[in-house]
Amino acid sequence: QVQLVQSGAEVKKPGASVKVSCEASGYTFTSYYMHWVRQAPGQGLEWLGIINPSGGSTTYAQKFQGRVTMTRDTSTSTVYMELSSLRSEDTAVYYCAKSLTMSAPAAFDIWGQGTTVTVAS
Amino acid sequence: DIQMTQSPSSLSASVGDRVTITCRASQSISNYLSWYQQKPGKAPKLLIYAASSLQSGVPSRFSGSGSGTDFTLTISSLQPEDFATYYCQQSYSTPYTFGQGTKLEIK
């Protein structure tokens, strides 16, 4: 079945970087955009950006420009999200989510299980 | 950025009730509106896409309507498993923003 499996929880110090992976299976990896969304403790959902697994093109939310990098490895059907210059406000659960259709402006039909990133000194 | 505003922020209801949650966009988003359900400690689950299309496997008691700036999610007869937090989200333009959420609690 279609699923996204993310890497495990991370604890980082302020100023460090974190790289979260998301391995896709059960569908044609390069045919559907992938998004990254985060959720701070007790808060709502926040979109970080999108990657086209086919060509690797990306669009990031302005808020994260310069700090976030999304990449993909088509040989392993995996997308990555790296966030740098971490601060305490980046403590959150990070999700990857697959586009429902083969176009960017679409709903997110399959979500990863989430990766908890904790930023603390 | 397009702002998405949900109302109410929280709602108490009983099993069997009909419930409506509204979502308003700060500008027209056509029908690029989705609804998600999230339970504690779990990833969100897609319920409705393109404002009114029911995602595969989602019970028919869930329905969505609206276009432009005003949208609604309706649950026709609440079931115990429906008590959760609901989010709307626009995919008209980046950043793809979410509403603040509506927490549906048991009365």
Image (cartoon, coloured by chain):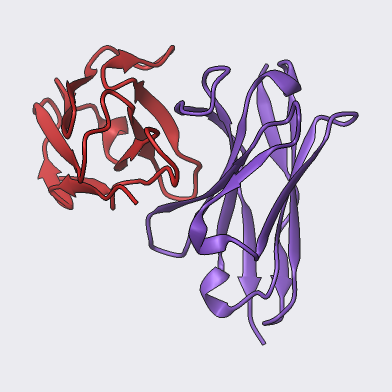
Chain colours: A purple, B red
Q: Looking at the image, which residue is at 34% across and 36% down?
A: B90
Question: Which of A68 and B72 lies nearest the eye of the viewer?
Answer: A68
Question: Which of B38 and B78 lies nearest the eye of the viewer?
Answer: B38
Across and down, in percent, residue A39 comes to 48, 56
**Quarter of the image where the N terminus of chain A is located:** top right
Left or right: A46 in relation to A101: left
Across and down, in percent, residue B63 comes to 22, 18
Q: Looking at the image, can residue B107 be seen? A: no
Question: Which of B89 and B27 lies nearest the eye of the viewer?
Answer: B27
Numbered-mark total = 0
Give the answer, above or below, for where B12 lies relative to B33: below
Q: Looking at the image, which residue is at 31% across and 41% down?
A: B87
Question: Which of B107 and B64 lies nearest the eye of the viewer?
Answer: B64
Give the answer, above or below, for where A12 lies relative to B98: below
Residue A74 falls in which quadrant of the image? Answer: top right
Across and down, in percent, residue A24 comes to 73, 29
Q: Looking at the image, which residue is at 40% across and 34% down?
A: B91
Residue B18 falls in which quadrant of the image? Answer: top left
Across and down, in percent, residue B10 comes to 17, 51
**Quarter of the image where the C terminus of chain A is located:** bottom right
Q: Looking at the image, can residue B65 be seen? A: yes
For this orientation, the residue located farthest to the bottom is A121
Give the answer, above or below, for where A50 lies relative to B18: below
Left or right: A119 in relation to A18: left
